[in-house]
Image (cartoon, helix red, strand yellow):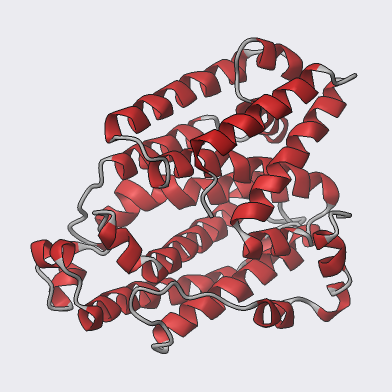
Amino acid sequence: MDWGPGTWARLQQSVHRKILRAASEADAFCIIVRAARSVLRAYSSSFFLVTRFLPPVKRAEVEVVYAAVRYPDEVVDSFPWPADCKLARLNDWELHYRSALQAGGIKQQIQAGIPWILAGFARVVSHRGIPPEHYLAFLDAMRRDARPAIFADFDELIRSYVYGSAVVVGYFLTHIYGTADGTSLEQALGCARELGIALQLTNFARDGEEDRRQGRVYIPLDALSRAGFRLEEFLRCGNPEALRTATRWLAEQAEPRYLYARLHLPAFSADCRTAIHACIDVYQAINRRLLDGGASAGRRVRLNAFEKFRMLPPGKYWRVPLAYARLV
């Protein structure tokens, strides 16, 4: 999915007009949620589906979080701009975020030139007590994507990139999901960390060839070496068999983390566990397909609609048609 800068700009203009006509702060936030839901539905069929099993208030906030991470990611991944322009946009985005944290109501923020995504996200950050610096770590990871880095080993990959690109996103969601009675926030955050790493590694594994074509290497140098690659050879002309070996290694690192997340799922509030469980099921199925050699070089591993449907809890099947009819 690629909307491009023009589509994002038109969406922003439309949402801002609606917000300025909103009768209340609650109405303004509902407008933001509906726009964020359209972003989620357009970009991620899997995550859109599993979030339908969240309680409505929490689901709305998760949708706003998704938009807040999707837009910067699209700037660096899809916008046809030179690196300097992408970095300038990310820097402006960070300034808007800092301003949104200090500003008043949503309508006031829009009048001050703050993008709707950040106006909504700042409301969620405040409401849920999310440490503001987590989003700054995410934006730092996006800056690294604008000028891709090389990672010597797995620990450096996690510390220097995955923490900002995925772990803190799991932290955002944990603050929204909440914890089970008798469970500390730290326990739930620990589970979110492992699941966030697992999801990111699966995406690295399934996107290895596309990332290579963009000059990005999320496979650590030591893993590339074990697969028989020198970095220059990998960037110049990917060897399909060696690439499969290297990306399979990433999937292997993800697998125990999915198992950890399953084991520690009870740390989260009961009203969110169905959605988290469905997320684990869908993405671990993709990961296991990568492990089993079900990936073709250069083609992204996906699950079809029936495969995803089979992983949903039977008692919740009714939500699927309603979700696509935009009723939930």
In percent of width and height, residue 131 lies at 56, 33
**Relative horizontal placement of residue 247, taking residue 165 as reference (left or right):** left
Q: Quadrant of the C terminus?
A: bottom right
In percent of width and height, residue 320 lies at 81, 68
Q: Note whether 256 is above or below 190 in the view shown.
A: below
Work out whether residue 313 or residue 41 is closer to the camera in this orientation and state it.
Answer: 41
In percent of width and height, residue 118 lies at 61, 28
Q: Residue at x 53, y 39 (%)?
A: 71
Total label count?
A: 0
Work out whether residue 131 or residue 275 is closer to the camera in this orientation and state it.
Answer: 275
Work out whether residue 236 or residue 112 is closer to the camera in this orientation and state it.
Answer: 236
Q: Note whether 201 is above or below 169 in the view shown.
A: below
Q: Quadrant of residue 203 in the image?
A: bottom left
Q: Quadrant of the N terminus?
A: bottom right
**Relative horizontal placement of residue 205, taking residue 178 as reference (left or right):** left
Q: Residue at x 76, y 44 (%)?
A: 60
Q: Is residue 105 visible?
A: no
**Relative horizontal placement of residue 33, taking residue 237 as reference (left or right):** right
Q: Note whether 161 is above or below 306 in the view shown.
A: above
In percent of width and height, residue 223 lies at 20, 71
Q: Residue at x 43, y 71 (%)?
A: 254
Q: Note whether 323 is above or below 202 in the view shown.
A: above
Q: Residue at x 39, y 88 (%)?
A: 293
Q: Quadrant of residue 31 in the image?
A: top right
Q: Is residue 290 visible?
A: yes
